[in-house]
């Protein structure tokens, strides 16, 4: 491994560790921060591929935490009520992942920057946008969230607008959201199987290292949550996302020029 490779590996480990630690403390940001950071270093499809498995593990941990149910029991319990949302988000994720292969990544980078901008501004304003809890809205939101999630890993920015209206139970919102995220990762794995299979052994080792690093940092963040002010860390995540979003947006604009 060359010095440049070692430096890049250390940088990636730092990015995933910081994002996972902040996610453990504040409960948000890990997938979006890591994807946006890597999109500044790699072509977006490759960045998505590198993030798939670490974020899949973190989603699975969140999915299993609390409630005393297995993965399958969680799927059947929440799937009975939210199966249509899960299905539409899965179909949207398949289309979104295909967009990574079909169109110029420049346009997806611009979409990612726009989604980050919407996410940051709405968070700073302190307003939770809620959508009507109707079947047509559910279908539109599920499919749209899937497309955005499959192509940019930013599914939660759209999905939460519906889930906040559909349920007032925080545990249900978390579980249903993670069910859709997990299905989105499955869709990405299926659609991006060729780029995934083309990964070198060194890249697989890197993914394994990043996964372990993310889990350890997440668990530390969760332990620190009771001692540290979550609001400050949420503000830090928004600041990091703003900087990364501007950088990714500039990459997209530069690609059009």
Image (cartoon, grey):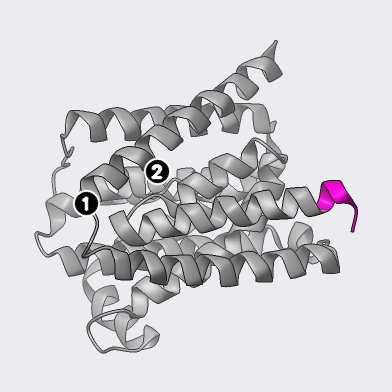
**Residue sitting nearer the eye, 245 or 132:** 245
**Residue sitting nearer the eye, 192 or 49:** 49
User: Measuring 66% from the left and 41% from the top, which residue is drawn there?
Assistant: 44
Name the residue carrying label 2: 144
- Where disc 1 sits, the SS reads loop
For marks 2 and 1, give the CA distance: 33 Å
User: Measuring 36% from the left and 62% from the top, which residue is drawn there?
Assistant: 24
- Residue situated furthest top in the rendering: 257
Q: Which mark is residue 62?
A: none
**Residue sitting nearer the eye, 244 or 46:** 244
The boundaries of the magenta stretch are 1-5
Name the residue carrying label 1: 229
Mark 2 and mark 1 lie on one chain; the one further toward the N terminus is: 2
Say which quarter of the image contains residue 208. Answer: bottom right
Say which quarter of the image contains residue 188. Answer: bottom right
- Residue situated furthest right in the rendering: 2
User: Measuring 54% from the left and 49% from the top, which residue is drawn there?
Assistant: 34
**Residue sitting nearer the eye, 224 or 140:** 224
Q: Looking at the figure, which quarter contains the N terminus?
A: bottom right
User: Measuring 60% from the left and 50% from the top, which residue is drawn there?
Assistant: 97
């Amino acid at each position: 491994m060359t010095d440049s490779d070692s430096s890049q590996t250390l940088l990636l480990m730092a990015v995933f560790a910081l994002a996972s630690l902040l996610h453990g403390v504040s409960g948000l940001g890990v997938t979006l921060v890591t994807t946006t950071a890597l999109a500044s270093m790699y072509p977006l499809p490759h960045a998505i591929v590198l993030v798939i498995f670490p974020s899949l593990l973190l989603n699975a941990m969140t999915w299993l935490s609390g409630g005393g149910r297995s993965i399958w029991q969680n799927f059947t319990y929440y799937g009975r009520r939210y199966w249509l949302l899960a299905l539409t988000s899965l179909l949207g994720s398949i289309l979104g992942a295909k967009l990574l292969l079909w169109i110029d990544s420049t346009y997806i980078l611009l979409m990612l920057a726009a989604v980050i901008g919407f996410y940051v501004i709405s968070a700073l304003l302190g307003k939770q946008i809620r959508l009507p809890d109707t079947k047509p809205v559910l279908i539109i939101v599920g499919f749209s969230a899937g497309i955005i999630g499959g192509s940019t890993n930013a599914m939660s920015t759209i999905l939460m607008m519906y889930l906040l209206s559909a349920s007032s139970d925080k545990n249900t919102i978390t579980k249903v959201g993670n069910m859709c995220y997990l299905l989105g990762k499955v869709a990405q794995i299926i659609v991006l199987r060729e780029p995934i299979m083309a990964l070198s052994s060194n890249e697989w080792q890197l993914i394994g290292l990043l996964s372990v690093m993310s889990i350890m940092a997440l668990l530390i963040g969760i332990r620190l949550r009771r001692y540290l002010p979550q609001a400050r860390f949420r503000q830090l995540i928004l600041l990091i996302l703003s900087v990364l979003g501007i950088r990714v947006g500039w990459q997209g604009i530069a690609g059009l020029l």
